[in-house]
Image: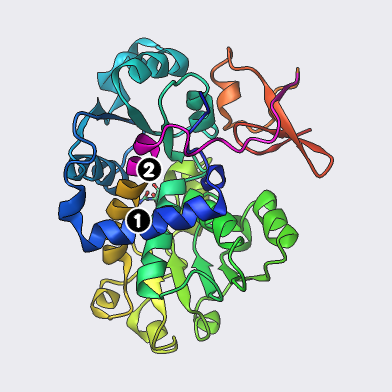
Amino acid sequence: MKHRHVVDLEDLTFAQLQQTVELAGKIKANPERYRHVCDGKIMATLFYEPSTRTQMSFQTAMMRLGGKIIGFDNPQNSSVAKGESLKDTITVMSGYADIIAMRNPIEGSAKAASLYSDVPVINAGDGGHLHPTQTLTDLVTLSNEKGRLNHLKIGLCGDLKNGRTVHSLIKTMCHFEGNSFVLISTKELRVPDYIKEIMNNSGCPFEEVENLQDNISDLDVLYMTRIQRERFASPEEYESQKSIYVLDAEKMKKAKEDLIVLHPLPRVDEIAVEVDDDPRACYFKQAVYGMYGRMALILLLLEDKDYFFHNQNEKTVTDKLCNNPRCIVRQEHYLPKYYYNKNGHQVCTYCDHIIE
Ligand code: NCD
């Protein structure tokens, strides 16, 4: 059987990605037609990390397709609390469910889970690494609200270092023609080097700036993000970065009439509540589009067993341990130390960090 996991949106071909976005639009236009397409199917939602939207939207997506759900939202209520490995939990769950959506705080955990599952695993966020279904949410939103996925000037603001939604979005938007990025953050919270390399390799123009106010006026999209407190090494480091960027009505006056403001949510203080009433604020609508995107993805994965396949270049075993302290191979020691080659480097198959 082919692997058909969605660890990264790159697991879908460009045509499949477009088909998923289009199907989301069709489901939104005619939800009645899709009410029973997953009758008799079960989805397991395994959430090792807090979530409101992602978890609930996966669950409502499955239920609106006629399927049922099992799972946990607090690993302390499962055998994980007794020390069960990820491998054992996934092996057993893949015997119960037809599809698994998993969120885990450890980078590369989704890839690791996919190795032990006979049913599709969807990455619902693996630490600060990736969050492909949030990007699918963003694509469905852009396609409906802007009418296109190309030729967009996209500003991303906030925690660009730890924000997995930012990493997934940049990776995907680089594939569409004519997009460019304005990366607005402090020096400490800039995007990781591997993301810059992706933009460089795809010829996608980007600039790194520190001021939101001075850079808002020619953006088509402004993607605000929360400073990811849980990913900071110390409370002091977080304190030094919080509340630096706040989008308010004053700054919105400088923006284009057809700008749209996105945010994966939850919001802390980076968008003032007064902006919610501005017609350009799309972040609550975005959460609804996410449910339709997930409905489309679940349906395509369950409908055709050979539809998606993991586009993993190489899987070679090394004896070197990935040097990313947040990588899953450092926690779950039975995992084969897989790497792939990229631009002359050995890169960890789980978390995409260069293995030195
Ligand atoms: C994001 C996440 O979990 O990465 N939220 C989401 O999925 N809707 C963003 C965040 O937590 O800041």
Labels 2 and 1 touching (C-beta < 8 A): yes
* Ligand 1 neighbours mark 1 (CB distance < 8 Å): no
Please tell me which of labels 2 and 1 falls first in the chain. 1
Report whether residue 341 is seen.
yes
Q: Position of residue 254 (x, y in %)?
A: 44, 89
Report whether residue 267 is seen.
no
Look at mark 2 in the image and give the residue it sits on.
300
Q: Residue at x 53, y 40 (%)?
A: 233
Q: Compared to 8, does 75 lie above or below?
A: above
Q: Nearer the viewer, residue 202 or 78?
A: 202
Quadrant hosting residue 188: bottom right
Look at mark 1 in the image and give the residue it sits on.
23
What amino acid is at disc 2?
Leu
* Ligand 1 neighbours mark 2 (CB distance < 8 Å): no
Q: Is residue 199 left or right of residue 333?
A: right
Density class for disc 1 (Cα within 10 Å; few <14, some 14-19, many ≥20) is many
Q: Is residue 219 left or right of residue 50?
A: right
Q: Residue 274 got which mark?
A: none
> Magenta residues?
298-318
Q: Residue at x 38, y 61 (%)?
A: 140
Is 304 one of the magenta-colored residues?
yes
Q: Position of residue 5 (x, y in %)?
A: 48, 34
Q: Residue at x 50, y 29 (%)?
A: 109
Q: Is residue 213 left or right of residue 27?
A: right
Where disc 1 sits, the SS reads helix
